[in-house]
């Protein structure tokens, strides 16, 4: 039976009874620490453990949040009597922390105003607020075909190396110019180098003054990667509820959260479910995603990179993530290979905001026409590859002509890639994108070389 955290249990000392890598069993003679309790062990309490299950009347099984080097059987374990806590306060701004709330930017201690547990119940439905505002990104293809919801959850889906991280970095950059709230970046299980790069680029653009970065990267134990998302959510909730700031929560990468859950589940000896995923996948994901919500005080808008294993959009983890989002931007390898960056697949991407009531009649009409043209082109591709363009009717030829120009117009130079493309980034207001697409659809550029539309910003720059 689940017990509550209690003060009496505080400082109760147990003993390590078994140790297998990141899994530690500890025996207590006093009441067992409840699930999610934080235990400390090792010299100077350097090893942090979290209780996962009770395996019998006197033993708990824990997962380590820090490396377990130096631990051994018979060593003492101290029950802190509480779950993992994270420092909160304005002092977090401009800082980079790990899952335990320790600074990792070498800038000294953080003067926190209070400590919050990393697990908090999701906001009650009656307290949630939704809006039908659009979160404009300045990226043409996203704003037109998969507009993001202000206070909603958006996903950037893609296989390895198709541009998810670049896209998230670009959004961080674009927001610096027009977003007033706090940015919270949560790195889960990605490369350590990426954390460094992001910190540096945020310093350069000045975004860092309004940002908090929290990392559990690929070199950390699965327990740390599994819990870092919850720590970031508590910080987001603190900024929303206490400081009443709008929060932009960027997560790179949510798939790694699911994956760390799989590792933890395997370590705990649970029998895997479909494709080796943990049987608790849906619950674990919902516990994280459901906390991302907006209240009357302020909003949390989230953008999440989602790695798609083997480019398979039917992977169970990916399918579960899709279900939580109000906008899904799908990146395609085919487009990336053609150099059509950002490699957004216009037909697979989706947003529930794309309705006339939200974006307006004109935007909706243009987006539908663009989609139809691109879908027709997709269907004609087989015929073209077998018989050539000459065999197409003049109407079909005109469709292909427009679709190819639209595809090129949807490419866009990014600030995030400026160093290696040598091309300065461009932000395009959605109104200009709509007007440009109308002109392309009307056939105004039929005789213009399609390359003239490649990697430009707005049309008036050509
Ligand atoms: N908008 C873009 N413009 C030009 N090149 C790009 C763009 N987006 C991505 N690329 C190229 O693709 C590479 C991989 O991008 P990125 O690191 O964002 O991929 P990813 O999907 O996050 O990969 P991973 O899953 O491995 O983390 C970049 O280093 C760059 O060469």
Image (cartoon, rainbow, N blue to C red):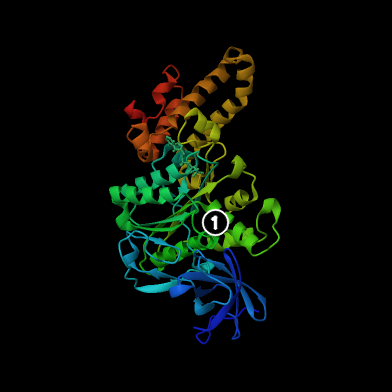
Q: Which residue is drawn at 33% across and 68% down?
A: 110
Q: Mark 1: give few (<14), some (14-19) or many (20+) Cα within 10 Å.
A: many
> Which is nearer the eye, 118 or 71?
71
Q: Percent position (x, y) of residue 410? A: 45, 32
Q: Residue at x 54, y 35 (%)?
A: 333
Q: Percent position (x, y) of residue 171? A: 40, 46
Q: Which residue is drawn at 50% across and 74% down?
A: 41
> Which is nearer the eye, 169 or 226?
226
Q: Is residue 352 visible?
A: no
Quadrant where the C terminus is found in the figure: top left
Helix, strand or loop for disc 1? helix
Question: Residue at the top extreme?
Answer: 390
Task: Say whether mark 1 is within 8 Å of ligand 1.
Answer: no
Q: Can residue 258 be seen in this view?
A: yes
The residue carrying mark 1 is 257
Q: Percent position (x, y) of residue 376? A: 59, 27
């Amino acid at each position: 039976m689940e017990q509550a955290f209690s003060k009496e249990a505080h400082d109760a000392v147990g003993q390590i009874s078994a140790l297998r890598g990141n899994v530690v069993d500890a025996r207590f003679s006093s009441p067992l620490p409840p699930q999610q309790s934080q235990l400390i062990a090792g010299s100077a309490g350097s090893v942090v453990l979290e209780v996962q299950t009770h395996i019998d009347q006197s033993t708990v099984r824990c997962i380590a949040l820090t490396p377990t080097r130096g631990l051994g059987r018979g060593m003492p374990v101290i029950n802190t009597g509480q779950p993992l806590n994270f420092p909160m306060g304005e002092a977090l701004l401009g800082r980079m922390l790990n899952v335990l709330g320790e600074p990792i930017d070498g800038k000294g201690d953080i003067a926190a105003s209070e400590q919050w547990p990393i697990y908090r119940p999701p906001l009650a439905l009656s307290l949630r607020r939704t809006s039908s505002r659009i979160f404009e990104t300045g990226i043409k293809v996203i704003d037109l075909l998969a507009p993001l919801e202000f206070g909603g959850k958006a996903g950037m889906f893609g296989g390895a190396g198709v541009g998810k991280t670049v896209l998230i970095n670009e959004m961080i950059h674009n927001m610096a110019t027009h977003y007033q709230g706090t940015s919270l970046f949560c790195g889960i299980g990605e490369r350590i180098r990426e954390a460094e790069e992001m910190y540096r680029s945020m310093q350069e653009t000045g975004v860092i003054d309004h940002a908090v970065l929290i990392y559990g990267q690929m070199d950390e134990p699965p327990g740390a990667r599994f819990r870092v998302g919850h720590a970031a959510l508590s910080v987001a909730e603190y900024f929303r509820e206490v400081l009443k700031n709008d929060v932009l929560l960027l997560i790179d990468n949510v798939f790694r959260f699911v994956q760390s859950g799989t590792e933890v589940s395997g370590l705990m000896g649970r029998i895997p479910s479909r494709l080796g995923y943990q049987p608790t996948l849906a619950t674990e994901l919902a516990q994280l995603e459901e906390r991302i919500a907006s209240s009357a005080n302020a909003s949390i808008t989230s953008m999440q990179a989602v790695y798609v294993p083997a480019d398979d959009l039917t992977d169970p983890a990916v399918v579960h993530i899709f279900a939580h989002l109000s906008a899904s931007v799908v990146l395609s390898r085919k487009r990336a290979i053609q150099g059509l960056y950002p490699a957004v697949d216009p037909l697979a991407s989706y947003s529930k905001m794309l309705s006339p009531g939200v974006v307006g009649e004109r935007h909706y009409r243009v987006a539908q026409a663009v989609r139809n043209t691109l879908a027709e082109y997709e269907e004609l591709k087989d015929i073209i590859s077998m018989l050539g363009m000459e065999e197409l009717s003049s109407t079909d030829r005109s469709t292909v002509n427009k679709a190819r120009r639209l595809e090129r117009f949807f490419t866009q130079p990014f600030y995030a890639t400026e160093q290696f493309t040598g091309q300065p980034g461009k932000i395009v207001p959605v109104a200009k994108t709509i007007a440009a697409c109308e002109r392309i659809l009307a056939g105004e550029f039929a005789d213009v070389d399609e390359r003239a539309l490649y990697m430009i910003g707005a049309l008036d720059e050509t």
